[in-house]
Image (tube, coloured by chain):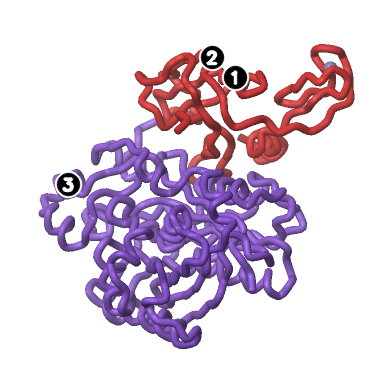
Chain colours: A purple, B red
Amino acid sequence: MAGIVGYGAYVPRHRIKVEEIAKVWGTDAESYKRGLMLKEKSVPAPDQDTITMSVEAARNAVKRAGIDPVLIEAVYVGSESHPYAVKPSGTVVSEAVGTTRNIHCADFEFACKAGSEAMFICIGLVEGGAVRYGLAIGADTSQGAPGDALEYSAAAGAAAFIFGKEDGVARVLHTHTFMTDTPDFWRREYEYYPRHGGRFTGEQAYFRHITTAASQMMEKAKMKPQDFTYAVFHQPNGKFPMKVGEMLGFKREQMEAGWLSPTLGNTYSGSSPMGLTAILDVAKPGEKILMTSFGSGAGSDGFIFEVTKQIDKVRDVAPKTREQLDNKTYIEYGVYAKFRGKIRKAV
Amino acid sequence: MFPSRYWREIPQRYRLEAAKCTGCGKVSFPPRSKCPKCGGVEFDEARLPEKGVVKTFTIIRVAPSQFVEQAPYAVGIVELEGGVKITAQIVDCPLEDIKIGQKVRIEFRRLQEDGCSGVICYGYKCVPAL
Ligand SMILES: [Zn+2]
């Protein structure tokens, strides 16, 4: 099997509080804070996008891997907010990181599970011997329409993983996937903001796919929730990942290390991958991690990792995920609207 | 910016690639064809470090057309570890908090974009060090 040889995250510095958004639209901040367990979310600066955050997360992963980046032979960037409609994000990331030019590169899209798709494929390529090292990235700077429920959660961030044949910091023990055609969330070509099926996005989409993928994977691995020290699920808000974990039989303590959404928001393709980076920042050798992503449309990818001794040597080599989360500057709604291109200067 | 000019500067803008004179060891950034110190013409490729200190800076309030949306913004001269100085925007920091002597590091950012339909130019900027 393959292993994660290096990992890294990137969290932009700016945050907006739920109260600040609720104030503008005249909604009840407390109901979002209690109902969705969201306090604040990250906001990208105007000069940040999926490509810039991917580069920073990838550079952190290269530092932790301790390898010459020229040995990376595959790069996949999973996102639903690629800056170009036509022109890959991966070419910029590859050049900025300094990989070989004999690299296989593609941009992935699958709503919020594009990042775990990239991980899944890198693992396969490494195991099959097609590439020595593969770089998988999940990153997004997603937008919610002004006043829409998604505006309270749509955030920005990136996570990057370098997979190799060696065990690295965490061995991949199992992978699994589950998918159906479910129209719970979509964005049509030339539309700026996505649309969603309201309450339909919960039970038939998020909960069904994650519980099915995770329970089938545990059955395949002959493992139970109590065999894991940590579990991390896609985090569209603060509430859903805790609820889906409980449905599967996990306890709050197993999910807290990777539960970033209350102060980060939903980073879409970056969501459960960033949670995994926060877990690796604190995990000990021998501990097992269950990760299950979710992407609307809809599907879930599952992974089981076992942490190795190597983790203690590399975790301090790059900024930790929660350190980045704590390094923040709050902005008001007006600045947020400018940063996100909702209002523009007349020129 | 023309795509061809942007493309030529990618090694410097993305990876801070500099030229180290094989004769006297002086590092030139951006790379030159002739060493300004000894006149040598042979170089090794060198990668500049990502940490540095603000030597001086200015606030741009009246910006060239492609940067109008970003104004006001700070541009500084930053001395990177090892002594090479670069000119870069200083971002993620309130303008009134930027100080000479401040520790910064390099981050990858969007530099400019050619309207809504043109090429997006990426490269380095400086942000406060953690
Ligand atoms: Zn010289």
Q: Secondary structure at mark 2?
A: strand
Residue in the picture at 30% in, 81% down: A204
Q: Is residue A273 left or right of residue B13?
A: left
Where B109 sits versus B64, above or below? below
Where residue B114 appears, as percent x and y from the top left, is 54, 39
Where A272 sits versus B77, above or below? below
Kindly indicate whether the residues beneath marks 3 and 1 are on one polypeptide chain: no
Q: Could you give the CA–CA distance between mark 1 and mark 2, rounded to whole angstroms?
A: 6 Å
Q: Chain of mark 1?
A: B
Circle 2: residue type: Lys
The residue tagged 3 is: A19
Kindly indicate whether the residues beneath marks 1 and 2 are on one polypeptide chain: yes
Residue depth check, mark 3 versus mark 1: number of the one nearer the observer: 1
- Tell which of A165 and A144 is nearer to you: A165
Circles 2, 3 touching at the beta carbon (< 8 Å): no
The residue tagged 1 is: B79
The residue tagged 2 is: B55
Q: Chain of mark 3?
A: A
Q: Could you give the CA–CA distance between mark 3 and mark 1, rounded to whole angstroms?
A: 41 Å
Q: Could you classify mark 3 by the number of other residues whose Cα lies within 10 Å: few (under 14), some (14-19), or many (20 or more)? A: some
Q: Quadrant of the C terminus of chain B?
A: top left
Q: Is residue A247 left or right of residue A269?
A: left
Where residue A296 appears, as percent x and y from the top left, is 39, 72
Circle 3: residue type: Glu
The answer to whether residue A88 of the structure is visible from this angle is: no
